[in-house]
Image: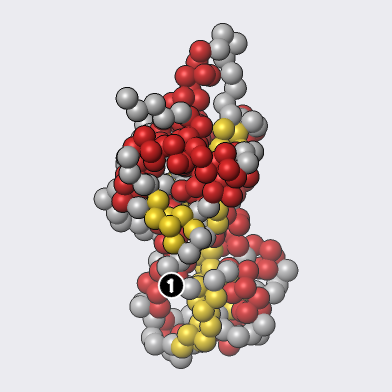
Amino acid sequence: MINISPRQLEVFVQIALHGSVRAAAERLHLTQPAASMALAEMERQLDAPVFARERGRLRLNARGRELLPLAQELLERHAEFGRRGREDGAALSGELRIGASNTVGNYRVGELLGTFVRVHPQVAIRLRVANTEAIAAGMLDHSLDIGCVEGPVAHPLLEVHPWRDDLLVVCAPPEHPLARKRSLRPADFAGARWVLREPGSATRATSERVLAQLPPGETVLELDQIEAIKQAVVAGLGIACLPAVAVTDALATGRLKALKTPFLDLRRKLSLLLHRQKYRGALLDAFLESTGVDGVG
């Protein structure tokens, strides 16, 4: 009879998320030998390894990838059993791993997390900020519980739920020739020098859609941070398509100017990502409720 304990499951999950026994032991306040013994005993009971050993790191093998979401679900259900079993009704606690693409993580984090953090202060939030492609990958390998992204995501294992409308603007330094024109036409952008986000980001995808509606220009820089792009444009290195929420301060102080481009569609949706196979326990349900997204249940 297999008798795998919650502690062994915790060790397995933490090693899967962090790649080493040492890191898992630190997160769980165990000694490294104790964590190693817990993993060894779990693998002995399963009669199969769940990790491949590669240059000092542990990476999930096929069996481990199949078992990881089940182990996470068992731990969440174990915690819920304890909460519901207490007569006084314990407050939500635990850890929620959230991935946010750059615009959300840097400029809308208050909107995303504020209500939940105020209502559930005992829940630890682990926020990872990366581009949309990286957040989707984190959802698929179960290192993230939920994602919030700017770009379109199409994967059969991921649900996409619209969260907020977002708007981009084409920005230039005030002395740029395009900023001095009273009215602009698409033809005015011929030969324009553009500063773009890196491939894999949602802002890059939107920028490419915009550039496809304009005469050919030149890409002079590719940067992986919105703030870096802002500074490049302020310095006169080119023009850029940036989230409106990210340039409010620069526009207000006159360091940037938003070009009037009614002939361009600069709207997009910010969306929540959920894994179709992930168990939605009390923590995830409470977070989804706090976002106000309809039709998630």
Q: Nearer the viewer, residue 262 or 120?
A: 120
> In this figure, which colouring scheme has been used for the structure?
secondary structure
Q: Is residue 179 above or below residue 51?
A: below
- Point out residue 86 in the picture as x, y percentages from the top left corner: 55, 12
At a point 45% along the width and 66% down the height, the residue shown is: 201
In x, y percent, where is residue 265?
Answer: 40, 66
Foreground residue among 10 and 39: 39
**Residue 88, image x and y in percent?**
60, 11
For numbered disc 1, what is the local secondary structure? loop
Give the residue displayed 50% in from the left and 54% down from the top: 19
User: Image quadrant for the N terminus?
Assistant: top left
Which residue lies under the disc numbered 1? 199
Q: Nearer the viewer, residue 217 or 78?
A: 78
Q: What is the three-letter code of the residue carrying label 1?
A: Pro
Task: Identify the residue at the far right of this view.
Answer: 253
Q: Which of the 4 image quarters holds residue 250?
A: bottom right
Other residues around mark 1 within 10 Å, as few (<14) / some (14–19) / many (≥20): some
